[in-house]
Image (tube, rainbow, N blue to C red):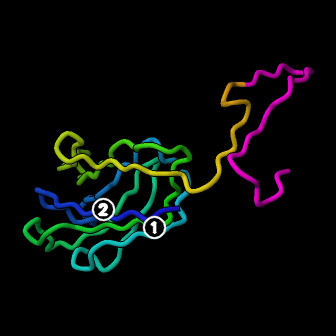
Amino acid sequence: MSDFTFEFLSEKDIIQAQLGGEIFVDFPPDYLIDSYGGECEINEEFSFFVNCYIDNNRIFINASNPLWTPSMGSLTFLAQNIRTPDDDGEARNFVISNYDSEKKRIVSRTYSTLNPASLTYVYDGYLISINNDEPIDVEVGTYTDEIVLRLPGPALQTLT
């Protein structure tokens, strides 16, 4: 699990939540955010409360201060307890969007060509390799050849 802090500055005003304004963060497909048991926070000047929810790999932030303008500086959004990918490597870009849900349009967003937001990560545990990562075909009523499980080191728990 990891905590992420996003700091961004919208060049356009962020519409009030009551009028359909939302901010959302698209996580790269490397992340599988199928359940979100974490917490989120945003600048108190922007909102004293924040309501975050998930739809696929997108975290919606549904809160705003009607007096917030881009001249007030950047917004800092913190998402805690996000499950990191299982494979080492570089993740694709995170995209942050300022959205008008009434008119169904993106008011402003980040772009990977202008502001790359990728992340290199290392899986912090042992990965079990099964059958050298080759597919296993088992037909109904048959047995398979030996399936090899490999661990990069000794297991600290019983594998059953």
Task: Name the residue at 19% across, 39% down.
Answer: 113
Q: Quadrant of residue 139?
A: top right
Residue 10 drawn at (x, y percent): 16, 58
Amino acid type at image mark 2: Phe
Q: Give the residue pinned by disc 2.
A: 6
Frontmost residue, 160 versus 16:
160
Sooner in the amino-acid sequence: mark 2 or mark 1 = 2
Which element is circle 1 on?
strand
Which residue shows up at 46% across the image and 55% down it? 54
Magenta-drawn stretch, dominant element (helix, strand or loop): loop
Q: CA distance from mark 2 to mark 1?
A: 11 Å
| Residue 116: mark | none
Q: Is residue 70 rendered to the left or right of residue 136?
A: left
Q: Quadrant of residue 144?
A: top right
User: Is residue 74 toward the left or the right of residue 155 in the image?
Assistant: left
> Measuring 44% from the left and 48% from the top, which residue is drawn there?
57
The residue sitting at 21% across, 49% down in the picture is 109
Provide residue 99's location: percent of width, then percent of height: 25, 52
**In the image, is residue 125 above or below residue 17?**
above
Magenta span: 136-160
Identify residue for label 1. Answer: 80
Q: Position of residue 110 (x, y in %)?
A: 22, 48
Say if the magenta span includes residue 148. Answer: yes
Front in this rendered view, residue 130 or 136: 130
Total marks shown come to: 2
Amino acid type of the residue that numbered disc 1 sits on in the rendered structure: Gln
* Left or right for 36, reference 134: left
Q: Is residue 60 above or below residue 128?
A: below
Q: Is residue 33 magenta?
A: no
